[in-house]
Amino acid sequence: MKYANPVIPGFHPDPSICRVGEDYYLVTSTFEYFPGVPVFHSRDLVHWRRIGHCLTNEVQLPLGEAGSSGGIFAPTLRHHDGWFYMTTTNVSGIGNFYVRARNPAGPWSDPIPVAQGGIDPSLLFDEDGKVYFQSACDGGEGNGIYQCEMEIETGVLLTPSRLIWQGTGGACPEGPHLYKVGALYYLMIAEGGTEYGHMETIARSAQPYGPYEACPHNPILSHRSMDSGIQATGHADLVQAQDGSWWAVLLGIRPAAYPKRHHLGRETFLAPVTWTEDGWPIFGRGGVIDGEMQAPQLPARVWPQPPVRDHFESEELGLEWIFLRNPRPGSRSLRERRGYLALRGDKTTLDDGKAPVFVGRRLSHFRCRTAASLTFEPRADGQEAGLTLFMNEKYHYDLFIARREGRKAVVLRKRVGSMITEQVYDCPAGPVVLEADARPDLFFFRFGPEEGSGQRVDAGSGETHFLSTEMAGGFTGVIIAMYAVGGPCPGESEPALFDWFDYEPLETDARQAAD
C-alpha cells in the first residue's frame, strides 16, 4: 500500500507530531488566522482528521496587532505524564509561551509565558525529570539554537539560556527539536530559510548542552536545486511508531507552474526515516521524498470525508472554518435566520490589514469548485458581500454583490499590489450563486440565479500566480472566504445571508492512500 503526499494539503506549515499509544496528534502554524493551531488526529500517519484548536479565545490568541504573516509561528506538540503541551510564538504579542490540556481536542489552558526569546520553541521532557526548552534566537552568543531548563508548572527558567548549536552554515537556523534516542541527544533543525533553499540538518551529543557533532550526511532532507514537484522541504519533526518504525512530518510546497510559484501555501508531508549503522537518521530516499511513498505498516483508519455542501444548519461552524484575526462579536450568526450564515459587515475592508467580517477555509486543491448562495441587499455605496480568494490585504480576488452607480451589481475585483481592476455586471433578482473554480494556473468566476433558475454568467478569470507566495510574500496560503463590508454606514446595512457553501475537490484527494 502506498500513500500520496502531502498528507494534509493546503496551508498547514511547520507540522509537529507526538504519539500516545496507537494515536498520533499533529499541530501546524496559523499566523494571523483564528482560531490558532489546529489539532489533527490519526491512527496510521496517513489519514488525518481535525479535532480542535489549541487557541480558541482572545486571551489565548490576541491578534489585534498581527500584520500579514504575523501572529502564531511554528508550534511544537509533546505529551508527558498525561498532559499535552503545545508551545509556540505569538510574534505579534506575548512571544514564546505554552498551553496544556488533558484532551488534545481541548479545552487548553491560558498561555504560560516563557522568558527565553526567539521563535519556534520546542520542549524535551528528559528521563531524569528535567525539562529543556529550545528556541531559535539571535542572542548574545550569536544566531542559533538556544536552550534552558524550565519549570513546567510555571514556565520559570531554572538556568540561563545558552547557545547549543548554530547549524551547518545555512541561513536562518530555526525550528529546533531535541530528542533523546538511546543514550544520545539529537538536535534537529531547519536551515536555509523556508524557501527553495530549505533543508533539515541534525547533530548529536552525549549531553543536552553539547558539544554537538554534526551529522556527516547533512542535510538529511533537502530538495534544493532538484527537478521535483515538491520543493522547500524542511522544518520536520520525528516520531517513532508503535511498531518501532520511524517517521517524519515536514513542510513542503508544490509549485504549480514555471517559473516556480505556489499559492496553496506550505503543506504537511510524511516521510519514512531509517537509521544508518552509525546512528544517523535518513529521510526517504537519501534525503528526498516523493509524491507517492510506501505507507506505514499500521492499521489503516480512513476518516469520513466532509460533505461538499455546508448547509449551515448546525449550532456552530465546523472546525474547517477560520477567521482573519480576532472576529468581532456579533459579526456572524447561525441563529439569526435558521439554515443561513448571517454576516453583518462593518467599515473594515479586505484591504485594511485588520479584521474584516470574514469566514474562510483553506484552499487545499489545485482543482476544485467553490460556490455559495447569497442573499444581500446593499443600501449604500461601500456595502458589499461575497466570496474572496484571499492571500493578504494587497493580493486577493473578490466576486461580490454591491451598489454601483445606484444599482445592485455583481462585481469581480482583482487586487494585485497597487493595481485594482473591476468588472461590473447586472445582478439577478433574488438569491445569487457565486462560483470560484480553481485550476493550477487560473481561477474562474461565475454567477447566476439560484440553482435551476437560469444560466451562469462568466465573470472572468485571474491567474493563480498573482496570489502566490513568490508574488505576494508571506508565509500563508490562499483562503476561500465569505465576507461582508458594511460601508460608511454599517448600521443601515442588511445582513449578508449565505444559504450554503460548497467546496468540491476535482482531483484525487491527497489524504487518500493510493493502491
Image: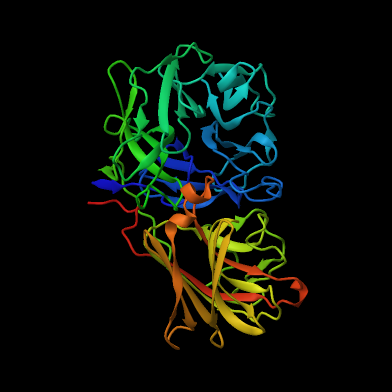
Q: Nearer the viewer, residue 102 or 184?
A: 184
Q: Is residue 145 above or below residue 443?
A: above
Quadrant of the image occupied by residue 221: top left
Q: Residue at horizontal 47%, vertical 56%?
A: 466
With 155 as the anchor, is 295 left or right in this view? left
* Residue 184 seen from this side: no
The residue sitting at 53% across, 25% down in the picture is 124
Q: Residue furthest front?
A: 419
User: Which quarter of the picture shows residue 364?
Assistant: bottom left
Front one among 450 and 131 = 450
Q: Please tell me which residue is depicted at 66% across the width and 79% down the height of the picture.
A: 378
Q: Position of residue 36 (x, y in %)?
A: 59, 48
- Decide: is 5 above or below 281: below
- Quick check: 278 left or right of 339? left
The percent position of residue 165, horizontal first and vertical second, equals 51, 18
Image position, residue 446 (x, y; %): 45, 75
Q: Residue 379 at what x, y percent from top left? A: 70, 81
Indicate left or right for 256 with 172 as reference.
Answer: left
Q: Residue at x 40, y 63 (%)?
A: 442
